[in-house]
Amino acid sequence: MAAFIVRMGPVLMLWLAVCVSGSWAVDRGNFKTCDQSTFCKRQRALKPGQSPYRALLETLELTNTKLTLQLINDNNKVRLLLELYRLQGNMTRVKINELKPLKPRFEVPDVLINDPPTEPLSLLSQDENGMVLSLGADSQRLIVSAKPFRLDIMEGREVLLSLNSRGLLAFEHLRIRKDTLADPEGAEKKEETDAASEQTEGEEATKEDEKVEDGMWEETFKSHTDSKPNGPTSISLDFSLPGVEHVYGIPEHADTLKLKTTDGGEPYRLYNLDVFQYELFNPMALYGAIPVMLSHSPQRTMGLFWLNAAETWVDISSNTAGKTVFGQMLDYVQGSSETPQTDVRWISESGIIDVFIMLGPTPTDVFAQYASLTGTQAFPPLAALAYHQCRWNYNDQEDVAAVDQGFDQHDIPYDFIWLDIEHADGKRYFTWDPHKFPQPKEMLQGLEDKRRKMVAIVDPHIKVDNSYKIHSEIRSRGFYIKNKDGGDYEGWCWPGNSGYPDFTNPEMRAWWASMFAYDQYEGSRENLYTWNDMNEPSVFNGPEVTMHKDAVHGNWEHRDLHNIYGLYVQMATAEGLIQRSGGVERPFVLTRAFFAGSQRYGAVWTGDNAAEWDHLKITIPMCLSLGLVGVSFCGADVGGFFKSPSPELLVRWYQTGAYQPFFRAHAHLDTPRREPWLFGPENTALIREAVRQRYALLPYWYQLFYHAHRTGQPVMRALWVEYPQDTATFSMDDQFLLGRDLLVHPVTEEGARGVTAYLPGNGEVWFDVHTFQKHNGGQNLYIPVTMSSIPVFQRGGSIIPRKVRVRRSSSCMEHDPYTLYVALSPKRFAQGELYIDDGHTFSYEKQKEFIYRRLAFANNTLSSRNLAPGSQFTTLSWIEKIVILGASKPSKVTLKMPDGKESQLEFDFDASMSVLTLRKPGVNAGVDWTVVLQ
């Protein structure tokens, strides 16, 4: 670390000193509370009650695509414009903006994949109190109440959702600062003043409008001052969800899957921040922000998407929160008629209100609705689903070669080795340290010879150095973010004094993408991929370790778009990796900061965690929360980034990570080395087995990601997603499903001798994937465990493909055979799928080059049928073995081919476990075939 603390300012020196010291807890004083964020404090001071907003029904305009209606604040006479849209797919969009703002207010671009298609709204009735509109499906109605303004969405006689029912709509309009009116610079301000008069209908501003509170026009936090040239611009809106006790989403927070009520505490904060050694189980902001919340009850799942990229706070309250089990039982015995209800309030610093109400009604419907708005998970190269080895930092080319050789010597597969910031020449990204990595192409070629790959970090802070090509070009093209005075914004990060490219500028993104071309990124090859870290953005000497809000991106302040910056960085990087191959190869890009829509560009991870048992446990709800809002490609640093794990914790973390979507070990610069073979042969064997289980299951992982890419369904799922009426699953976050068919309950307690897993589904059965023991669904099952145990169960009624010949990398297994695991339901039925393509190009999409097959077992017959007749692809892989769980012993087994050829298959039957193993069917994995048990 000392080598790169040269020529850095005192603030950065202090920050780094904390980073490498023994003080591991987050310094909460570096980050704002709601009370310290003045707009949050102002808005939260408003209590539920009568709303000052009134709908002016005479201004109603209804077209084929939308309804518009003016609202007026009776306290200050400022008018707002309400726009209502009925969207295809059972969604409603609500937009509220100023009717005549002094200047445009920021509306988030580039997140929606298109302009959402609308369906006509029809006016059913209207009087002086409001109106009733039809939403089309299932007797759904939208009721607009005029005074006070309120929206209710109903289905039949049931209220699904109410908007502004607690009167917390608040919209701070743009205004002229009163003490600037005498400014001699004059004309422009006079125009704005005239517009302000028009905005309030020529009436004198009320005392409320003139009132200036601390923080409205300038705000100071610690040593940093925010100039707030536009004054107060915050917005707030409340939603009520009758019948709802469980809400989820709004990542990223290191907290439980089910969101907690915030009464009497801090709201959940959405503001992308570089939080050093974050704490668990609190609503503090972390690296990413996805303003999407799901509500769930046995009757319905719905979603709210608050499309705003400014700092946002979310308050949650519930009329059942805090009730003891006894209190709930007393309500039941006494026949309490109080309907459970959850109330949610969103508060953002700037922008407009733009909210999408996704009406479900099923979890699958909500996932599809959200995917139709922001897109689906990028379909990664298959190798990216394998194991990744990383640390800050592998020292040099010799170190990389030694680690690579160590995996071979210990027979542990891996696909990617990673290089952190020390690989570059003085933290100048797109370069290589000439002493430590003098021959990067040769190093990459050595990995390619073993069919392995590398990831190198490229961060979005650029060293200010006139001899550095990247910096010089960005500066000469005017692509840096500006400070409030018009100069290039500069701050401290890993290279020292750094500039920050304006990734909101499409020209900047296009230029950045071009830098990944092989003739621009010297030393790069086809097997080099990219990691975007520190893209919140992290500014060591900035307020809250991030960028000043009054920095400028073109016409907009940083405050308007802060949470979308990281998405733009990953977007430009992914586009660069695509372009360098002429549009042929799929990219792989990992990002730390993210927003709604980031799923389209790659993977995320949960940031700088610690080698502690609670940090292992929290990986499950953190990734489950991300999956619920579109981001399936999620993982956590295996072993913990900070501190040093005990051998037991490291083994358990590998066993957990092997069943999470993004599987990467990573460690801090100052931690002892922890390659998998450094903890003794016994632990090496346990880690090897966990990694090998991951590789054997890659065909299933790959088809799950294909599904996620096509449909928006999450890969790693909360149990309630598949069992939406089973209330026992609603708060469960210590186990999870992979797709529908695998249930995983990792061992995350130190010294555990057993775990209790909940097997859902009355009338269903689950099979232990290791022992093939059958267990009934609808029960809590106690499982004795040893250090080798990873409790995983396959659902009866499913078929899962595996490749059990595990080799040094996934690419080496490309043509290897499949083993099918057929787990029969109580009705002796099962189905599954098999998806195959080349594993790395866009040919599956552009040329329809893939195999997609339905595997089904019914009436003692197992068959493989083509699900995509228009596709074309050939594979050398074949079906090597079929294992049928819950089977009966047949007298003979016949393989039948479409051309009429038949052959008898050898089989073994284990009567004690009811397991039938069919040996050497030998049939190509891409053709039709049938196996008949007689």
Image (tube, rainbow, N blue to C red):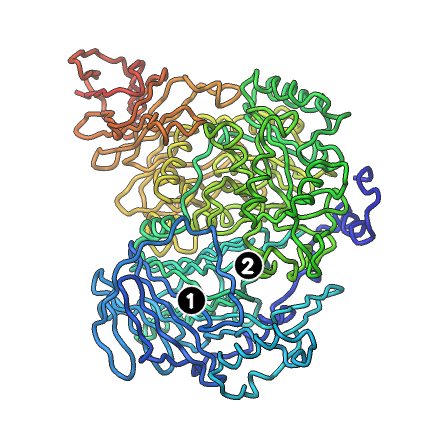
Residue 468: image quadrant is top right
Do we see residue 609 in this rendering? no
Q: Position of residue 214 (x, y in %)?
A: 66, 77
- Horizontal side of 899 relative to 47 (left or right) equals left
Mark 1, secondary structure of its residue:
helix
Q: Position of residue 79 (x, y in %)?
A: 44, 78
Q: Three-letter amino acid code at disc 2?
A: Leu
Residue in the image at 43% along x and 42% along y:
377
Q: Position of residue 691 (x, y in %)?
A: 52, 28
In depth, the one of 2 and 500 nearer the eye is: 500
Q: Three-letter amino acid code at disc 1?
A: Val
Mark 2, secondary structure of its residue:
strand
Residue 893 has which mark?
none
State the count of labels: 2
Q: Is 624 placed above or below 76 here? A: above
Q: Is 876 placed above or below 33 here? A: above
Between the residue at mark 2 and the residue at mark 1, the CA separation in whole angstroms equals 32 Å
Residue in the image at 25% along x and 33% along y:
830
- Horizontal side of 852 relative to 263 (left or right) equals left
In depth, the one of 621 and 837 nearer the eye is: 837
Residue 759: image quadrant is top left
Look at mark 1 in the image and give the residue it sits on: 325
Q: Position of residue 767 (x, y in %)?
A: 35, 35
Residue in the image at 65% along x and 18% along y:
442
Q: Closer to the N terminus: mark 2 or mark 1?
A: 2
Query: Tag 2: Cα neighbours inside 10 Å, few (<14), some, or many (≥20)?
Result: many
In depth, the one of 339 and 64 nearer the eye is: 64
Do we see residue 433 in this rendering? yes
Look at mark 2 in the image and give the residue it sits on: 270
